[in-house]
Image (tube, helix red, strand yellow):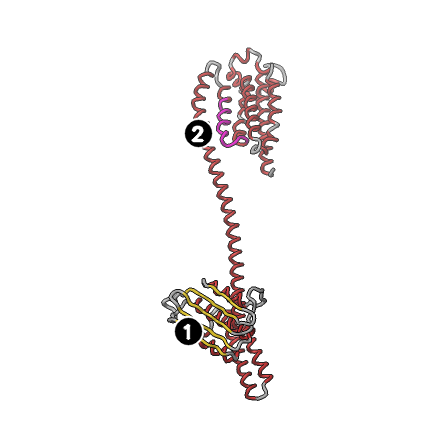
C-alpha cells in the first residue's frame, strides 16, 4: 500500500466517523427534554437544528417516542460497520464483491437511521464519496443514485414517498444505465491504453535489441572485411617479401641480391599502400586505373614472375564492365587462389581462366601441385574468405582437390552490369 493510498483510507474513515458523530449529536439534541441542564445550553448552541428536525420528521415521529427507543443501537452498528472501510479500501480492486456488499450494508444502515431521524441524512451523505472511492467504475453511478434516493426519501413526508420514489426511479434508472455505459467505455479505453503502452514498451525493447544486433552485425562485418583485406593484400605481400629477403640472403652474386632486394622494397611499398586502402575501404588499386581483364592480366604476369611458376591465362567471351563489388570479388579471389598456389601447392604449372557469359562470370584457377583434402578442416582464412566474398555478391565457389593431383578453384558470380556512371 502506498503512502498516498494510506492517507486516502484515513481520510474516508475520519469523514465517515465525523458525519456519524454529527448526526448522532443532532439526533440526541432533537430527542432531548426541553428543560434541565445541560440540554438548554446544547439546544441553544445547536440553534434551529432541533426545530428543523421536528419539522422534517413530522408529528408522527415525535408521537412514537422518536429516537430514544432504538437509534443508538443502529448507530453503534453503523460505527462498527464503518471500521471495515480501513480493511476494504486497499483491497477494492481484488475484493470487489465484498466491497459492493459492504457498501449496500452501509446504505441500508443509513436508510434505517434516516427513517428514524432526519438527523442521519448527514451521515447518509457518506455514500457519495465512498461510491466513487470503493465501487467499481460501472457501479459508481448506481451507488450515487442509491445514496440520493435514501437522502431524498428521508426528507419527504409519509404521504409523498410513494410518488417521490416513482419519480426518482424514472430518473435514476436512465442515470444508472448511462453511468454503466460510460464507465464501460472508460474501462475499455483504459485497457486499450494499457495494451498500447505495453506494446510500445515491448517495441522499444525490441528496437533496442535490433539496434544492438545491427551494431554487432556491423562490427562483425567490418572485422571480416578488414581481415579479408589484410589476408588478401598485406599478409600475402609480407610472405612474398620474406621470400625475397631469404632469396637475397642466399644469392651469391651481388646483381641477383640487388634484384631480390628491389622486389622486396616494391612489395613493402605495395603492402603499405594496400593497408591504407583497406582501412579506407577502397577498391583494389589495379581496378582503379584498369578494367578487370587488364588487372587480372597484370596480376597473372606479376605472380608468375614472383612465384617462378608457368601460368597460362585465358579470357573468353565478351568482356563487359561489371558492378564494382563483382569485379573486386573476382580480383580478390584470383589473387588469393594464386597466393595459395605459390605458398602451398609446389606446382610447376598453373592456369587462370576468366569467362564472360550472358548471365554469369566464371573464374577458374587450377594447378598441378601437391593438392589437399578439402573435407578436412583447415587453419587458414583463405578458402573461407573466398567463399564469404563470393556469397556476399550472390555467387558460388567450389574447390576440388586431391592429394598429389593438384587443385581447382571455380567461382561463378552473376554478371551484374555497372551503373551508367561507372568509370
Residue for badge 1: 315
Circle on res. 239: none
Which residue: 47% across, 13% down?
159
Near-viewer residue (365 or 61):
365
Corner quadrant of residue 325: bottom left
From the viewer's perspective, is residue 211 above or below residue 118? below
Q: Is disc 2 placed on a helix, strand or loop?
A: helix
Residue beneath label 2, please? 178
10 Å crowding of disc 1: few (<14), some (14-19), many (20+): some
Find residue 231 and report its horizontal and vertical position in percent. Answer: 54, 70
Q: Would residue 283 be seen by someone viewing this image from the given angle? A: no
Range of magenta residues: 134-149
Q: What secondary structure do most residues of the magenta stretch adopt?
A: helix
- Residue 182 location, x and y as percent? 45, 32
Confirm whether the magenta stretch covers residue 129.
Answer: no
Q: Is residue 178 visible?
A: yes
Quick one: label 2, few (<14), some, or many (20+) residues within 10 Å?
Answer: some
Q: CA distance from mark 2 to mark 1?
A: 87 Å
The percent position of residue 68, horizontal first and vertical second, equals 60, 15
Amino acid at each position: 500500500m502506498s503512502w498516498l493510498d494510506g492517507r486516502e483510507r484515513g481520510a474516508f474513515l475520519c469523514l465517515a466517523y465525523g458525519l456519524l458523530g454529527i448526526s448522532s449529536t443532532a439526533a440526541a439534541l432533537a430527542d432531548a427534554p426541553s428543560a434541565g441542564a445541560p440540554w438548554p445550553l446544547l439546544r441553544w448552541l445547536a440553534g434551529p437544528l432541533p426545530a428543523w428536525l421536528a419539522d422534517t420528521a413530522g408529528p408522527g415521529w415525535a408521537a412514537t417516542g422518536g429516537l430514544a427507543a432504538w437509534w443508538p443501537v443502529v448507530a453503534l452498528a453503523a460505527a462498527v460497520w464503518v471500521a471495515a472501510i480501513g480493511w476494504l479500501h486497499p483491497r477494492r480492486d481484488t475484493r470487489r464483491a465484498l466491497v459492493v456488499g459492504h457498501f449496500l450494508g452501509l446504505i441500508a444502515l443509513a436508510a434505517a437511521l434516516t427513517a428514524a431521524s432526519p438527523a442521519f441524512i448527514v451521515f447518509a451523505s457518506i455514500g457519495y464519496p465512498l461510491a466513487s472511492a470503493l465501487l467499481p467504475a460501472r457501479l459508481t453511478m448506481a451507488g450515487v443514485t442509491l445514496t440520493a434516493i435514501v437522502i431524498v426519501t428521508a426528507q419527504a413526508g409519509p404521504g409523498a414517498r410513494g410518488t417521490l420514489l416513482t419519480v426518482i426511479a424514472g430518473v435514476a434508472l436512465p442515470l444508472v444505465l448511462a453511468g454503466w455505459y460510460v464507465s464501460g467505455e472508460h474501462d475499455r479505453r483504459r485497457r486499450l491504453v494499457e495494451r498500447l503502452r505495453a506494446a510500445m514498451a515491448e517495441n522499444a525493447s525490441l528496437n533496442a535489441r535490433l539496434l544492438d544486433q545491427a551494431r554487432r552485425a556491423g562490427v562483425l562485418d567490418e572485422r571480416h572485411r578488414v581481415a579479408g583485406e589484410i589476408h588478401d593484400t598485406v599478409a600475402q605481400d609480407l610472405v612474398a617479401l620474406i621470400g625475397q629477403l631469404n632469396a637475397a640472403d642466399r644469392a651469391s652474386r651481388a646483381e641477383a641480391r640487388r634484384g631480390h632486394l628491389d622486389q622486396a622494397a616494391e612489395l613493402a611499398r605495395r603492402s603499405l599502400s594496400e593497408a591504407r586502402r583497406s582501412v579506407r575501404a577502397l577498391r583494389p588499386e589495379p581496378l582503379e586505373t584498369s578494367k578487370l581483364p587488364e588487372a587480372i592480366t597484370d596480376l597473372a604476369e606479376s605472380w608468375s614472375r614472383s612465384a617462378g611458376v608457368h601460368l597460362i591465362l585465358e579470357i573468353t567471351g565478351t568482356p563487359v564492365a561489371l558492378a564494382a563489388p563483382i569485379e573486386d570479388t573476382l580480383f580478390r579471389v584470383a589473387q588469393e587462389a594464386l597466393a595459395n598456389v605459390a605458398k602451398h601447392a609446389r606446382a610447376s604449372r598453373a592456369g587462370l581462366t576468366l569467362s564472360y557469359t550472358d548471365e554469369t562470370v566464371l573464374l577458374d584457377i587450377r594447378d598441378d601441385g601437391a593438392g589437399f583434402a578439402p573435407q578436412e578442416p583447415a587453419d587458414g582464412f583463405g578458402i573461407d574468405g573466398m567463399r564469404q566474398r563470393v556469397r556476399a555478391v550472390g555467387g558460388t565457389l567450389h574447390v576440388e582437390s586431391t592429394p598429389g593431383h593438384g587443385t581447382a578453384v571455380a567461382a561463378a558470380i552473376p554478371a551484374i552490369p555497372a551503373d551508367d556512371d561507372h568509370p
